[in-house]
Structure formats: structure tokens, C-alpha cells
């Protein structure tokens, strides 16, 4: 059987948790769309800071946003100016969606550093896509990236490419795996990400699985 289930979804409440934590039965659809748009804007704005993921927690009148980045100094800025600019950016986003200033939620923005970027699947996948876009040899990219991940303390890593690799006329699949990556073991701490690379010849799908130490 193929891998039909997202490795994060199957491990919810064991090694993974939800990226959005709230429940609003009356405005469920609108809140989901709002979370999607806000997360998309933040991922684009904090791209240079090496953002891996954005978690959103909501309560009655408050909104907590937790950003996980590899370079927190770029987000916080000198004397916290970067954090204030980020708060203004988020307030501007909500002002376009709410009817009055009284409905503005109380913002709490937290920046969490990623200690080892080579053990985060999204950052590893992003690094692979950037190298593929620069037309670097895919075999060298896969080998060097997998070695970096293993040297950072991972138990195993798998990187899969699919598409017109090296601009080939016929799409194909290539992958590399080092160590063990047990995708059926629920208690295994698997970091997973799918990051497509838009090259001149078309999209190349990049999927990364990293087996980290059990927490």
C-alpha cells in the first residue's frame, strides 16, 4: 500500500499538535479562511527569517500567534522594533476583515527559535527547492542534504523528488533515504513537509521525512 495519510495528521495528540487551536461553531468557515490567509501572509513576510510554521491560538477576545523561525533576531529586530512592525502588519490585516475597531482581538505574538534547522522538514525542503531552482545537480543536492540531516542527529531521513527533474521531457521520481523512517509507527517523531519547486521547466515536487528523537 502507498502512503495515503499525512504523517502529521496520523500523529495528532501523540508527537504532533494542531497548528490552529480554537473552536467557533457559528463562524467556523470564516475563521478557517482567516487562519489560512493570515498564515500565508506571515510565511511570506518572515521568509528571510527562516520561518518553519505558524501556530494560531484563539480565545474569546485574544489571539496568540506563535512563529517558529531559525533566525529570531530578524523578526524581533533591534530593541523589539521588528516585533512592533509585525504587530502593526497583523492589525492591518484584521482591520480589513472586521466591521469595527471594537472587534479587534488582543494580539500576543511569540517568536520561538528553532535550535536545529536541519531537523525541520519544511526548512530542509525549502533549501532543496532553492537549490533545484538554481539548477544545481539533483543527485548532489539530495546526498549533501541527507548527510547534513543525519549529522545533525536525526535517526533517519527520506527525500523524494517527482516531476521533470533536470528538465527531462518525461517526469520521473527520485529519492534518497538514510537511516530508518518508520512511517507506520505512531509514536515515531516524524517531521514531514511537501514543498514544490517551480523551475523553468515546470514544478518539481519535493517531500521530506525526518525521523527525530522521540520526545
Image: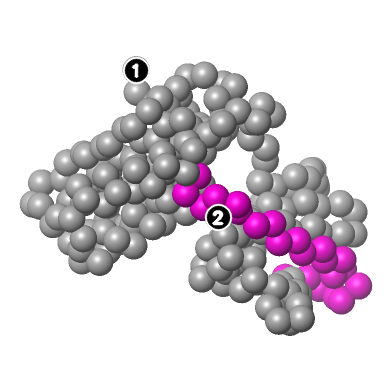
Report the residue marked by disc 2. Answer: 52
- Quadrant for the C terminus, please: top right
Nearer to the camera, 122 or 147: 147
Q: Residue at x 71, y 61 (%)?
A: 111
Across and down, in percent, residue 10 comes to: 56, 27
Foreground disc of the pair 1, 2? 2
Across and down, in percent, residue 150 comes to: 41, 39
Across and down, in percent, residue 147 comes to: 34, 43
Verify whether residue 145 appears in magenta.
no
Looking at the rendered structure, the secondary structure element under dot 2 is: strand
- Quadrant for the N terminus, please: top left
Q: Is residue 108 left or right of residue 125?
A: right
Q: Quadrant of residue 151?
A: top left
Across and down, in percent, residue 211 comes to: 48, 32
Looking at the rendered structure, the secondary structure element under dot 1 is: loop
- Real-space Cα distance between discs 1 and 2? 30 Å
Judged from this view, the residue extending furthest toward the front is: 151
Q: Is residue 167 above or below residue 102?
A: above
Report the residue marked by disc 1. Answer: 1
Mark 1 is surrounded, within 10 Å at the Cα level, by few (under 14), some (14 to 19) or many (20 or more) other residues, namely few
Q: Residue at x 55, y 50 (%)?
A: 116
Q: Residue at x 21, y 60 (%)?
A: 136
Q: Is residue 21 above or below residue 61?
A: above
Q: Residue at x 55, y 25 (%)?
A: 188
Q: Is residue 72 left or right of residue 131?
A: right
Q: Quadrant of residue 96?
A: bottom right
Q: Is residue 87 left or right of residue 8?
A: right
Verify whether residue 105 appears in magenta.
yes
Q: Which residues are magenta?
A: 96-119
Of labels 1 and 2, earlier in sequence is 1
Amino acid at each position: 500500500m502507498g502512503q495515503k495519510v499525512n504523517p502529521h495528521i496520523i500523529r495528532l495528540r501523540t508527537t504532533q499538535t494542531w497548528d490552529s487551536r480554537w473552536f467557533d461553531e457559528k463562524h467556523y468557515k470564516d475563521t478557517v479562511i482567516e487562519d489560512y490567509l493570515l498564515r500565508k501572509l506571515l510565511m511570506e513576510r518572515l521568509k528571510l527569517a527562516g520561518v518553519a510554521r505558524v501556530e494560531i491560538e484563539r480565545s474569546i477576545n485574544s489571539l496568540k500567534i506563535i512563529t517558529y523561525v531559525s533566525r529570531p533576531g530578524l523578526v524581533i529586530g533591534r530593541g523589539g522594533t521588528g516585533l512592533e512592525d509585525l504587530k502593526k502588519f497583523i492589525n492591518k490585516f484584521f482591520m480589513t476583515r472586521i466591521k469595527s475597531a471594537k472587534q479587534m482581538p488582543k494580539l500576543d505574538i511569540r517568536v520561538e527559535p528553532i535550535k536545529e534547522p536541519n531537523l525541520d522538514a519544511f526548512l530542509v525542503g525549502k533549501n532543496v527547492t532553492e537549490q533545484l531552482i538554481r539548477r544545481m545537480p539533483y543527485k548532489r543536492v539530495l546526498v549533501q542534504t541527507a548527510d547534513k540531516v543525519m549529522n545533525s542527529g536525526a535517526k533517519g531521513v527520506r527525500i523524494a523528488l517527482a516531476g521533470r527533474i533536470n528538465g527531462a521531457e518525461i517526469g520521473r521520481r527520485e529519492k534518497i533515504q538514510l537511516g530508518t523512517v518508520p512511517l507506520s509507527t505512531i509514536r515515531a517523531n516524524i517531521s514531514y513537509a511537501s514543498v514544490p519547486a517551480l523551475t523553468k521547466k515546470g514544478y518539481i515536487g519535493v517531500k521530506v521525512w525526518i525521523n527525530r528523537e522521540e520526545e
